[in-house]
Image: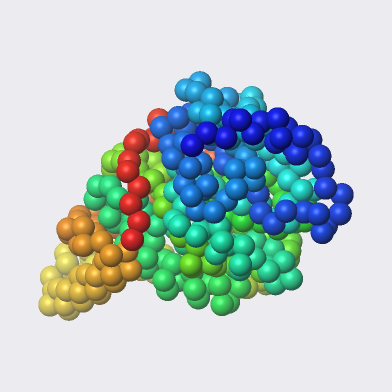
Amino acid sequence: MAYSSLNDDFDTIMTTKSTTKDRKRKLALIIPGHNEALVIADTIQSAIDAGQKPQDIFVVDDNSNDGTAKIARSILAKANVYSVGRSGKALAIKKAIAHFSIEDRYTWVHIADADSNFESGYFAEFKSHLDARKYVAATGYVKSMYGGWISRYRAYEYSFGQEIMRRIQHMLGVIPVIPGPTSCFRTDILKELDFETHNLTEDFDITIQIHRKKLGRIAFIPTAKTLTQDPKDYRDYVKQVSRWYRGFWQGVSTYKIGRGFQKIDGYLGYQILEMFAYYFNLLVLLPILLLQGRGVVVIAQTFLLDVVIFFLATLMACGVHRRLDILSAFPLFYVLRLTNMVLYVKAFFEVIIFRKYRHKQVGWSTDNRRYKVTPKSS
């Protein structure tokens, strides 16, 4: 469905700023992208199908050379698509907020990755839970699109992380990251946030800024569900997870996580200590015991218990997502769990010990990573 015929009307709307709060619209959607021709049309159309009006959808195209902006303009009004010079994701978002006068015209702004695919009723759910008196930001429920074994593992991770951990984080007020596919901010706090972050994971950096500046609570809206595209192969998975962990340790260093007195320090500090204790037991104590020929039966029992717990968690993911295909990749999940361990420790040494990745990163982590996939939801 094309909306370019509405250009003239939207041009007038786009150049008119609201000057009073009661004239503001509820929610804008900004989709930043660089070379997203494979997915941008599906993302925009899914937003429209999920209840977001076309005049409230804005695309910022960061120097694409594959026709991303042209495709976006074939669906939206031309005034709703803004092309900028090479900026990187965070700065492109900042430029879009200013260009579209988002702070003046809307109470909330939702920012979504260009490969997001929103489930039916997504924006109605978001709007019904956005209480400006209680929250300054919000995040929905991320699901994995159908794909190979990596996507099945991600479906397991997402279900465990959000059905259990995210709900606990919400209750405690310690949500550590508002993920890229589903991030929403009250527009009156945008001026307090530094979108020109040096962090490899700008979503983590911006979330920690909210905590550090004591701007307010972050909501988790589990009924608002969106699907995202996962790495297509093991190599892409390693690249993505390496960036995530390096960005995490950058944030830990920049904001001195664990050394402050906020709840987020206690939560992330505990997670870090727990993770290193687990890795030490697994990667150091266990090999020593095996080499000494001690505790073989106990080790075997412990491993069997881990398999059972992991298998039950995978079954939970199958039920949550109504996808039996997740179970078929279960044995291979151990490969990715071990990969995560190695990359977590490796990133710690790179960023904290050897002080690498401290310079400003300008670019897109999605370069050459997109592929065509048919989104399916449960």
Query: Is 65 on the left-hand or right-hand side of 205?
Result: left
The one of 285 and 205 positioned closer to us in this rendering: 205
Viewer can see residue 313: no
Which residue is at the far top? 65
Q: Position of residue 127 (x, y in %)?
A: 62, 62
- In the image, is residue 346 above or below residue 94? below
The one of 357 and 33 positioned closer to us in this rendering: 33
**Which quadrant of the rendered structure holds the C terminus?**
bottom left
Q: Residue at x 24, y 73 (%)?
A: 312
Q: How is the image coloured?
A: rainbow
Query: Is 173 on the left-hand or right-hand side of 350?
Result: right
Q: Position of residue 172 (x, y in %)?
A: 58, 77
Q: Residue at x 32, y 43 (%)?
A: 374
Which residue is at the far right? 19
Query: Is 281 on the left-hand or right-hand side of 39?
Result: left
- In the image, is residue 135 above or below residue 77? below
Q: Residue at x 61, y 52 (%)?
A: 110
Viewer can see residue 297: yes
Counting every numbered tag in the picture gives 0
Q: Residue at x 44, y 48 (%)?
A: 117
Asked which quadrant contains residue 238, the reply is: top left
Q: Position of residue 94 (x, y in %)?
A: 69, 40
- In the image, is residue 20 above or below residue 273? above
